Image (tube, rainbow, N blue to C red):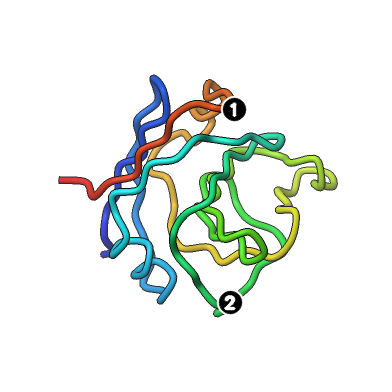
Amino acid sequence: MGNKIRITAGDVSMTAELNQSACAKKIWDALPISARASTWGDEIYFGIPVSCGAENPQETVEMGDLAYWLEGSCFCIFFGPTPMSRGDEIRPASAVEVFGRIEGDAKQFKKVASGTKVLIERAQ
């Protein structure tokens, strides 16, 4: 089982489990991280002070995936289609490294507006 984190954005607070990737470890080691959310379709993203290389870049992701955007050094939360999606797929702007997954209904993040403070910390 991977490390667990808590993501709090406005009134939304959810836990997620990190996978065993090198990117997940770097993010874990950098916690806590605080930033302001930007939204792009059904995605929240924000810059983080972590640099990850490509391990297993993906062009599409699943509902609830947490990913690192390689081109922008951003933490991304996916909870539905983005402007780049075709059909039912969830497509980031460009390749991402998936490093974890939300536990529960990721669609809760639809309530989070751009500019909302986001805190990522280790879950107890």
User: Which residue position is annotated with label 2?
Assistant: 56
The quarter of the picture where residue 27 lies is bottom left
Precedes in sequence: disc 1 or disc 2: 2
Give 67 or 87, whichever is nearer the viewer.
Answer: 67
Q: Give above or below for 73 relative to 119.
A: below
Q: Position of residue 67 (x, y in %)?
A: 53, 57
Mark 1 residue crowding within 10 angstroms, few (<14) / some (14–19) / many (20+): some
Q: Residue at x 46, y 33 (%)?
A: 105
User: Which residue position is annotated with label 1?
Assistant: 114
Q: Residue at x 44, y 40 (%)?
A: 35
Q: Residue at x 83, y 44 (%)?
A: 87
Give 17 or 87, whichever is nearer the viewer.
Answer: 17
Q: Nearer the viewer, mark 1 or mark 2?
A: 1
Q: Which quadrant, please, contains the C terminus?
A: top left
Side of 37 where 103 appears, left or right: left
Q: Position of residue 20 (x, y in %)?
A: 36, 72
Residue that lies at the very extreme toward the front in this rendered image: 49
Q: Give above or below for 91 relative to 29.
A: above
Q: Give above or below for 1 relative to 64.
A: below
Q: Position of residue 7 (x, y in %)?
A: 36, 39
Residue type at tag 1: Ser
Side of 63 where 86 appears, left or right: right
Residue type at tag 2: Asn
Q: Position of residue 31 (x, y in %)?
A: 29, 54
Q: Which mark is residue 30?
A: none
Q: Residue at x 57, y 26 (%)?
A: 110
| SS category of the residue bearing label 1 | loop
Side of 94 where 99 appears, left or right: left
Q: CA distance from mark 1 to mark 2?
A: 29 Å
Q: Give above or below for 115 relative to 45.
A: above
Q: Which quadrant, please, contains the N terminus?
A: bottom left
